[in-house]
Amino acid sequence: MAERARAKRKTKDGNGIGHNSGATPMLGDRQKTKVYLKWLPRIEAADARYQAAADVAKSRKGELGAIFEAAEQDGVNIVAVRKARKEHKLDHLTVSQDYEDMGFVLRLMKSPLAVQLNLFAPPQRDEETNVAIAGELAGRRGDSIDENPHDVGTAYFVTWRAAYERGQKGLQDNLRE
């Protein structure tokens, strides 16, 4: 019984033990030589291009490090620069929502960062912007379009729905990647 269970186990490609579909057929020496000679130059050329690009990347990384070091010696807060550059490359709506949520959590914790220093104060936005943000976030989450909380025909209904469609497009684009 245990032998049967082992025999039925699947390999990592999903086929059972001993299954040979998709396996490379056995080649004769002449065929094998021909196939290897076909691929070895391509592999060597691709590896040489990769190594050249890696050398350039290593050099550029060294240049960037030297610039960061010089800027830091001149009084630039490199940690802040790196963090700001990283956040700027992300989706701005998501970054905004993350900071808003972080502020909310810090206020719940009664953290001096939020309470005394007011670093994460809730942003002051007009109502139309809030409606658009809510619609886009709903679209990105994949919520139903029927969850639009505004009355049909109102400006806010239209704003929410247009933002929802942008969010849906962003969601679809992310799924494609």
Image (spheres, grey):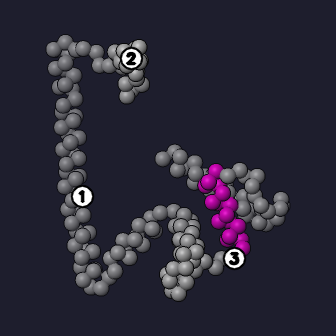
| Label 3 Cα neighbours within 10 Å, binned few <14 / some 14-19 / many ≥20 | few
Q: Position of residue 15 (x, y in %)?
A: 40, 21
Overall secondary structure of the magenta section: helix
Percent across and percent down for residue 12 are: 37, 28
| Mark 2 residue element | helix
Name the N-terminal-most of marks 2 and 1: 2
Q: What are the residue bounds of the magenta stretch?
A: 126-142
Distance from the alpha carbon under mark 3 to that under mark 2: 68 Å
The residue sitting at 62% across, 54% down in the picture is: 141
What is the total number of numbered labels drawn onto the structure image? 3
Q: Quadrant of residue 115?
A: bottom right
Quadrant position of the N terminus in the picture: top left
CB under 8 Å between callouts 3 and 2? no
The answer, for residue 154, to whether it is visible in the render is yes
Would you say residue 19 is visible in this rendering?
no
Residue that badge 3 annotates: 126
Q: Secondary structure at mark 1?
A: helix
Q: Could you tell me residue 68's position as x and y percent?
A: 27, 74
Query: Which of label 2 and label 1 is nearer to you?
Result: 2
Mark 3 or mark 2: name the one nearer the start of the chain. 2
| Residue that mark 1 sits on | 57
Identify residue for label 2: 2
Distance from the alpha carbon under mark 2 to that under mark 1: 54 Å
Residue at position x 37%, y 24% in the image: 11
Q: Is 40 placed above or below 129 here?
A: above
Quadrant location of residue 86?
bottom left
60 w.r.t. 139: above or below: below
* 158 with respect to 108 (left or right): right
Q: Amino acid at mark 3?
A: Asp
Cα distance between the residues tagged 3 and 1: 45 Å
**Residue placed furthest toward the front:** 1
Badge 2 density bin: few <14, some 14–19, many ≥20, Cα 10 Å: few
